[in-house]
Image: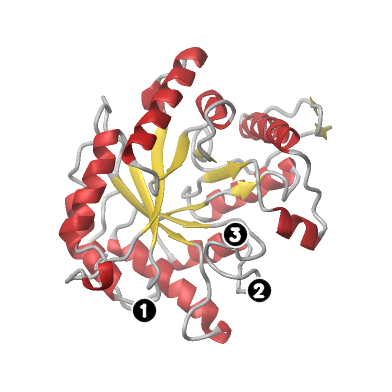
């Protein structure tokens, strides 16, 4: 099983003048701890469940590019890009650039978008939900066409590209993994089965809900004649770690048990945010106790294990350092 870190909040005790240093250090510690992936939200205003809109919010793809320069092995993705925020051709170029400059470490996280407030605030068109899903499907088609090197014109209902040239191509073959965020049973999970390499489900849900969503995805895979095992199943949650479980946090043993329950459901890759991500303690616990145990957990129902990136010698040194 794999573990990933999401950083949804950039408001830290050191203040805005230290934001770059703090975020860079978080990325370095995540990399050295052995976490498989690092994610940021693709929002322009802070979202309500995290804080007021006026709080600091970095643009996602730029933030990931900065993280790429501070790290060596951790994979990088948006959780997830709203399809309405950028023209598909530009978005594919952006994701490709991150993949090339990170030496093949990009995920392409995308969804139908939902935050009307930031759309209105920044003058971005916010079409009805049905149209956003139409745009999402066309964007996925454009991405796959551009990554396949097909420069023939794309003429969709919402987008027209006269020459969808993409040079250079990404380093990952056939392309960066496509992760579609959301758990809608009729549209989102159908698009996952048809186009994506990974899904993302909320682990805040009752475990029975996750089990049901995965069965729905399995049904869509059967309808699309797509092997269910080809889809990486990821989850998203908000966790707190401490050595002694103070304040309702998880001890390493409790965290390992939770991740084991998710693996038993078929989750390959558990992604989480932590409120004290600017502190050293959670990374020390992850590196020395949680990750080594979780990497040995077999995912239920997976016939072939997903490849895990090896942890380099010296990776557990969690102090300040530069990436490659």
Determine which residue is flagged by label 1.
Answer: 320
Task: Residue 6: tell me if it is visible.
Answer: yes
Q: Answer with left or right where residue 282 lies relative to residue 125.
A: left
Q: Nearer the viewer, mark 2 or mark 3?
A: 2
> Based on the displayed image, in which of its 4 quarters is residue 140 positioned?
top right
| Separation of marks 2 and 1 at Cα, in angstroms | 29 Å
Secondary element at tag 1: loop
Q: Residue at x 72, y 53 (%)?
A: 116
Q: Measured from the top left, where is residue 24 in percent x and y?
A: 47, 72
Q: Measured from the top left, where is residue 4 in percent x and y?
A: 37, 53
> Based on the displayed image, in which of its 4 quarters is residue 152 positioned?
top right
Mark 2 near mark 1, Cβ–Cβ under 8 Å? no
Mark 3 neighbour density, 10 Å: few (under 14) some (14–19) many (20 or more):
many
Task: Residue 268: tell me if it is visible.
Answer: no
Q: Residue at x 46, y 68 (%)?
A: 70
Q: Answer with left or right where residue 281 lies relative to residue 186.
A: left
Q: Is tag 2's residue or tag 3's residue first in the polypeptide sequence?
A: 2
In the image, residue 83 sits, relative to residue 76, either above or below, namely: above
Q: Residue at x 72, y 41 (%)?
A: 88
> Based on the displayed image, in which of its 4 quarters is residue 239 positioned?
bottom left
Looking at the rendering, in which quadrant would you find the N terminus? top left
Q: Measured from the top left, where is residue 275 in percent x and y?
A: 40, 69
| Separation of marks 2 and 3 at Cα, in angstroms | 16 Å
Q: Residue at x 49, y 20 (%)?
A: 220
Q: Measured from the top left, where is residue 272 in percent x and y?
A: 38, 56
Determine which residue is flagged by label 3.
Answer: 60
Determine which residue is flagged by label 2.
Answer: 54
In the image, residue 276 sits, relative to residue 227, either above or below, namely: below
């Amino acid at each position: 099983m794999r573990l990933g870190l999401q950083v949804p909040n950039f408001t830290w005790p050191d203040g805005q003048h230290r934001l770059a240093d703090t975020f860079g250090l978080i990325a370095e510690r995540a990399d050295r701890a052995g976490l498989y992936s690092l994610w940021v939200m693709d929002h322009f205003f802070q979202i309500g469940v995290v804080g007021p809109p006026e709080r600091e919010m970095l643009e996602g793809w730029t933030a990931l590019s900065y993280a790429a320069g501070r790290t060596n092995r951790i994979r990088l993705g948006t959780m997830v890009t709203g399809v309405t925020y950028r023209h598909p051709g530009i978005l594919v170029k952006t994701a490709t650039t991150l993949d090339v400059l990170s030496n093949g470490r990009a995920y392409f996280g995308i969804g139908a978008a939902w935050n009307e407030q930031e759309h209105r605030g920044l003058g971005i068109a916010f079409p009805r939900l049905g149209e956003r899903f139409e745009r999402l499907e066309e964007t996925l088609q454009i991405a796959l066409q551009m990554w396949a090197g097909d420069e023939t014109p794309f003429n969709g209902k919402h987008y027209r590209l006269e020459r969808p040239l993409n040079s250079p191509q990404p380093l990952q073959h056939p392309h960066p993994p496509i992760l579609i965020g959301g758990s809608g049973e009729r549209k989102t999970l159908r698009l996952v089965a048809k186009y994506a390499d990974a899904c993302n489900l909320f682990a805040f849900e009752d475990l029975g809900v996750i089990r049901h969503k995965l069965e729905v995805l399995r049904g869509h895979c059967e309808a699309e004649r797509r092997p269910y095992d080809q889809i990486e199943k990821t989850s998203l949650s908000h966790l707190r770690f401490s050595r002694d479980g103070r304040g309702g946090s998880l001890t390493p043993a409790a965290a390992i048990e939770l991740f084991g329950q998710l693996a038993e459901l078929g989750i390959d890759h558990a992604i989480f945010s932590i409120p004290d991500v600017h502190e050293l303690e959670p990374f020390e616990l992850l590196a020395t106790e949680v990750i080594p145990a979780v990497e040995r957990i077999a995912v239920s129902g997976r016939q072939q294990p997903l490849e895990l990136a090896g942890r380099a010698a010296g990776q557990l040194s969690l102090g300040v350092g530069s990436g490659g």
